[in-house]
Amino acid sequence: MAKKAMVEREKKRQKLVEKYAAKRAELKEIANDESKPMEERFKARLKLAKLPRNSSATRLHNRCQLTGRPHAYYRKLKMSRIALRELGSHGQIPGMVKSSW
């Protein structure tokens, strides 16, 4: 199990990303618009830089919903391979059977 602080930090980042998503998109659109004057685009870049760093979506890291494990993460299931195997072994995932040969 991952440290609780790491899981909480990731939740905090997720909230910031959701909070600033619209503002970031608006500023990026202005900054990348070639038809706008250079000063306006530069001001948009400065405003973008003043936003919290953790509000950027690239700072998010996928973690298992059950254990907080950052590696071996299945996006579709939102859990790690270890948690998936545990749930499969206990018969809690429909249609999943532990293989043996």
Image: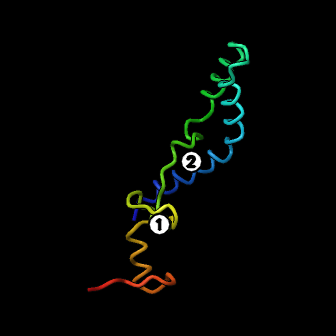
Q: Position of residue 72 (x, y in %)?
A: 38, 61
Identity of the residue drawn at 52% across and 55% down? 8
Identity of the residue drawn at 66% across and 30% down? 28
Identify the image quadrant of the N terminus: bottom left
Identify the image quadrant of the C terminus: bottom left
Q: Residues within 10 Å of mark 2 (few under 14, many from 20)?
A: many
Quarter of image, res 88: bottom left
Secondary structure of the residue carrying tag 2 is: helix
Above or below 100: residue 20: above
Disc 1 target residue = 79
Disc 2 target residue = 13
Quarter of image, res 41: top right
Identity of the residue drawn at 57% across and 43% down? 57
Which mark is on residue 31? none
Above or below 31: residue 69: below
Q: Residues within 10 Å of mark 1 (few under 14, many from 20)?
A: many
Of the residues under marks 2 and 1, which one precedes in the sequence? 2
Above or below 10: residue 100: below
Q: Position of residue 23 (x, y in %)?
A: 71, 36
Along the line of sight, the residue nearer the viewer: 10 or 21:
21
Q: Position of residue 51 (x, y in %)?
A: 63, 32
Q: Position of residue 70 (x, y in %)?
A: 41, 57
Residue farthest along the left direction in this orientation: 101
* Circle 1: residue type: Met
* Circle 2: residue type: Arg
Q: Nearer the viewer, mark 2 or mark 1?
A: 1
Give the tally of numbered discs.
2
Above or below 51: residue 66: below
Quarter of image, res 20: top right
Secondary structure of the residue carrying tag 1 is: strand
Along the line of sight, the residue nearer the viewer: 46 or 76:
76
Distance, label 2 to label 1, CA atoms, is 19 Å
